[in-house]
Amino acid sequence: MNVHSLKSILHLPMKTADKHDKIVQAAIRVFARNGFFDSRISEIANEANVADGTIYLYFNNKYDILITIFEEEMGKIIARVKQEIASFDDPREKLERFAYLHLILVQENRDLAEVIQVELRQSSKFMKEYRNKKFAEYVNIISHIVRQGQAQEIFLAEVMPGIFKRAFFGALDEMSRFWVLSYKKKYSVSTAARQISDYFLQGILAKKAREAVLPPNNRISRSGTRKKNT
């Protein structure tokens, strides 16, 4: 495509943004189906219903598309998590909600989950060279919740948020990876989120918080919504 055509596209921000997103979503499907290393630009273009050359108007190469997928999709996930946990006051409820939202991704968008859980980690270039600010922002949501709980004397003061966030994320990450690689689930997302949260919460609750059991109406139901008083 010539320079004149490129300038014309740049003057159409909405259409350009739509095409960019179309390519990203097509790449997610292709990477999930074929694997990152076995996928070709031509396959992504075909999936997005655009010419091969169009891909290079938006991305330098296949690796650039992979980075974009992570940054843009993680940005959406972070925004959703922050918005939803903001509706809870109790840090224990926030942790359980975080767990639920992390695990539900596999159910809501299996292709994206597979790219994030499997394909990204197989790219040594991504793991070694990419400064993963989005991932840091994501797990820092956990440490922020811990600090909030400590300020409210719900969580033990000696718990180190930096260690807890990695351990908690690690448990959720392993469950997600297991679900991505296996189509059979013996339990619901809400059950897994509740149990994993409980395992960790029992280890960090302060004495007075242990004596005050979280009301059942505040737990997450199987549908993922907070139970209401009846």
Image (cartoon, grey):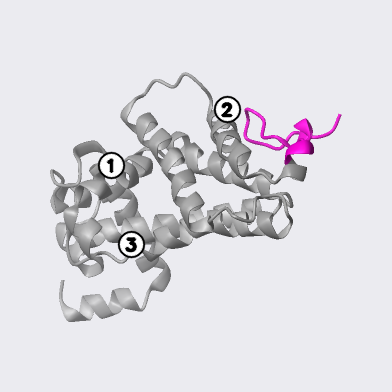
Which residue bears the numbered disc 3? 20
Mark closest to the chain's N terminus, 3 or 1? 3
The image shows residue 74, relative to residue 167, as above or below, that is: below
Residue at x 47%, y 53% (from the top left corner): 163
The image shows residue 8, relative to residue 18, as above or below, that is: below
- Residue 101 falls in image quadrant: top right
**Does the stretch in magenta take in 212?**
yes
Label 3: which secondary element:
helix
Which residues are the magenta region? Answer: 210-230
Label 1: which secondary element:
helix
Residue at x 14%, y 46% (from the top left corner): 37
Give the CA distance from mark 3 to mark 1: 23 Å
Q: Nearer the viewer, residue 88 or 113?
A: 88
Quadrant for the C terminus in the image: top right
Question: Within 10 angstroms of label 3, few (less than 14), some, or many (20 or more) residues?
Answer: some
Question: Within 10 angstroms of label 1, few (less than 14), some, or many (20 or more) residues?
Answer: some
Q: Which mark is residue 74?
A: none
Which residue bears the numbered disc 2? 191
The amino acid type of the residue labelled 2 equals Thr
Which residue bears the numbered disc 1? 118
The image shows residue 166, relative to residue 64, as above or below, that is: above
The reply to whether residue 203 is in sight is: yes
Left or right: where 110 falls relative to 60: right
**Does the stretch in magenta take in 175?**
no
Residue at x 23%, y 55% (from the top left corner): 50
Mark closest to the chain's N terminus, 2 or 1? 1
The amino acid type of the residue labelled 1 equals Val
The amino acid type of the residue labelled 3 equals His
Label 2: which secondary element:
helix
Left or right: where 62 falls relative to 22: left
